[in-house]
Image (cartoon, helix red, strand yellow):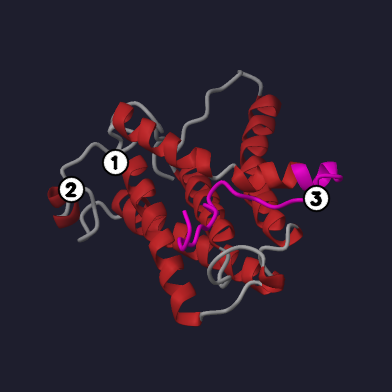
Amino acid sequence: MAGIHLTPLDLTYVLHNDESLVSLSLALITLSPILLMASYAALAVQSREYIIIVMWAGQLASEGFNWLLKHVMKEARPGGIGNGYGFPSSHSQYMAYFGSFLMCHMYFRHRFATTGVLFFDQLWRSAVYLGLIVWPSLVAYSRYYLGYHSTSQVLWGVGIGILLGISLYVVAELIPRKRPFSILGMDGLYGQMVGAKVSGRGGGMSGKDDK
């Protein structure tokens, strides 16, 4: 294939130190966000839950916004590792969006199954919330550790992802539930336009009574 420039697919191509178990572990962790898109698709098709579809759409929009920011800022990656621009880190933004949106949903709407023992119920909830913090944090750290992004690129990615995740959740679920007759409410103009099943009215990511 003479004359044709070939480039690796960064989505699944990760450089790491093959003599370090930590480096290998973080390389695998940095690939873990790939699993989310398949999960989104399967859940959206299986459940047709409004909140899952909104979360998935927001994830895609976040990726589009990240691409736009990179091509506006045009900040290089440290050490020249990886293709394209580095600001902000797309992996960090991706996982921060996921973790913040899902944590908001879990806190405000999700009904956890009970064991009948308050201590174990609280322990399980804490484990879920901790997991939603640790996983995105590890992915973000892996981008810095493996040399794909600088500290500022990672932190900005995390910050933007959290901002987008919380903002979309507030607009898409919190306000519609708390203010049902507002323009964003499920009984207002927004709800009439959507006309879709919302979590708590069917299976999937089940809801709980509003606080």
Amino acid marked by disc 1: Tyr
Q: Residue at x 49, y 62 (%)?
A: 5
Disc number at residue 111?
none
Mark 3 vs mark 1: give the one in front.
3
Question: Looking at the image, how many numbered discs can be counted on the residues?
Answer: 3
Identify the residue under disc 1: 50
**Residue to which mark 2 is pinned:** 194
Mark 2: amino acid: Val
User: Vertical placement of 76 versus 169: above or below?
Assistant: below
Mark closer to the chain start, 3 or 1: 3
Q: What secondary structure predominates along the stretch shown in magenta?
A: loop
Q: Secondary structure at mark 3?
A: loop
User: What stretch of residues is rendered in magenta?
Assistant: 1-24
Circles 1 and 2, Cβ within 8 Å, touching? The answer is yes
Q: Residue 27: x percent and y percent?
A: 70, 46
10 Å neighbourhood of mark 3: few (<14), some, or many (≥20)?
few
Q: Earlier along the polypeptide chain: callout 2 or callout 3? A: 3
Using the image, tell me which numbered label, if any, was put on residue 17. 3
Magenta-colored stretch includes residue 10: yes
Give the amino acid at mark 3.
Asn
Between the C-alphas of marks 1 and 2, the distance is 9 Å
Mark 1 Cα-neighbour bin, 10 Å: few <14, some 14–19, many ≥20: many
Residue 17 or residue 43, whichever sits in front: 17
